[in-house]
Image: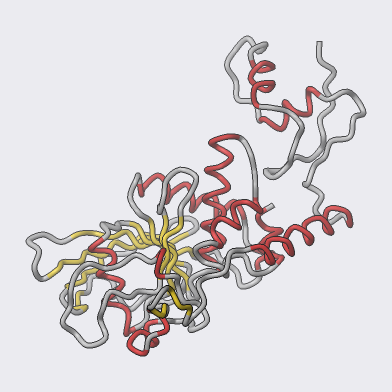
Amino acid sequence: MFQIQLCPLCNFGARFAISKKQTELLGSYIAEPVFVPHEVLCEALCAVGEVLENTAFIDTPRTSDSLNHEYQHISKSHIPDREEGVTDGEYTLFLDGTKPDNLDKNADLCVVPDDRYRPVPNITLNTLGHNDYINAVYISTFGEKDRLILTQSAIVSSAIDFVRLLHDHVIRTVVTFVDEVEPYMPGSNESYLIGPFTATTKPDTQKQVYKESVVQFKYIADYEGFEVRIIRFSKWSKTLDSCNIKDLMSLLISVQESACRRLVVLQCRDGYSQSGLFAVLWCLVERCQRDGEVAVAEIVKMIRRRRKQVITNEAQHRFCH
């Protein structure tokens, strides 16, 4: 017989000294199959009166200092991008985003992608200023390599390049955290030309935490067009403290169910603040589902290899816990 003492609060990021094998062993004593949270079983196996290490109470001085130390360690240990002008043998390397022809394609000039991780549009356009550059980076998750693409909001000079990216990489889901309508989206039931593409927007659908639009694009050389689901998250607050984790989780579940195994684009104004936090949340959930572990620092470091600005303030780091 077990003596059970339940802690009043448990949270998603709590860490317990118990393996999943022990959890399954305790679950085998239950006659009927029921869902029992892993953290509850962890508490049930502890002796009465034993103190559990739980990060739920993040306002305590000890835990606050610990999170601050962890964030400072992450900020100092990320792998930097290649510096501009670095010599490789007899060639000098320059990031494509810093070249004069591409400067006006960056919504934020301080955020330039490493070309090693940048998706490249394949269609060749004989139009001045439209080469294979786009300010975007691949992000790998624990489930699949290069599963996500982080990109800045499209501006007038980069709208054609963004639609080329959707076409060439067979992207059918875009999650945007920008309130304004993107330049590649016509109004509801309207159509217009974006370079060699025709874009037509169907009526919007208002969901609980986001607005969904379906835009049909057709390349001039293709017989058939393709549809892209544009999800605009409407619950994001300028102050992170009022951002509801339930709303983000609802958005995450909806996106994962509809995207299947295809690439998903995460888009925000600067290419990292909101979209980067959502990518971290995506990886946290995948890691927890795979092996039952929550490793915020490890995930942030992994994503910063591709987009070093992700989680650039301590408030977002605390939010992940």
Find residue 139 and report its horizontal and vertical position in percent.
45, 57
- Which residue occupies 45% across, 70% down? 114
Instruction: Say above or below: 315 vs 254.
Output: below
Q: Residue at x 43, y 73 (%)?
A: 88
Coordinates of residue 75 in the picture (x, y in percent): 68, 66
Picture colour scheme: secondary structure
Q: Residue furthest right?
A: 49
Q: Quadrant of residue 72?
A: bottom right
Q: Position of residue 34 (x, y in %)?
A: 60, 20
How many badges with numbers are in the image?
0
Q: Is residue 16 above or below residue 63?
A: above
In the rendered structure, the answer to whether residue 268 lies left or right of residue 32 reads: left
Looking at the picture, does residue 236 appear above or below residue 125? above
Question: Which residue appears farthest toward the front when viewing the image?
Answer: 90
61 left or right of 207 in image? right
Left or right relative to 316: residue 135 = left
Q: Is residue 44 left or right of residue 88?
A: right
Comparing 177 with 83, the one in front is: 83
Quarter placement of the N terminus: top right
**Image x and y of residue 143, in percent:** 45, 43
Front in this rendered view, residue 187 or 259: 259
Camera-nearest residue between 100 and 58: 100
Q: Nearer the viewer, residue 312 or 268?
A: 312
**Residue 151 position by quadrant:** bottom left
* Residue located 66% across and 16% down the image: 25
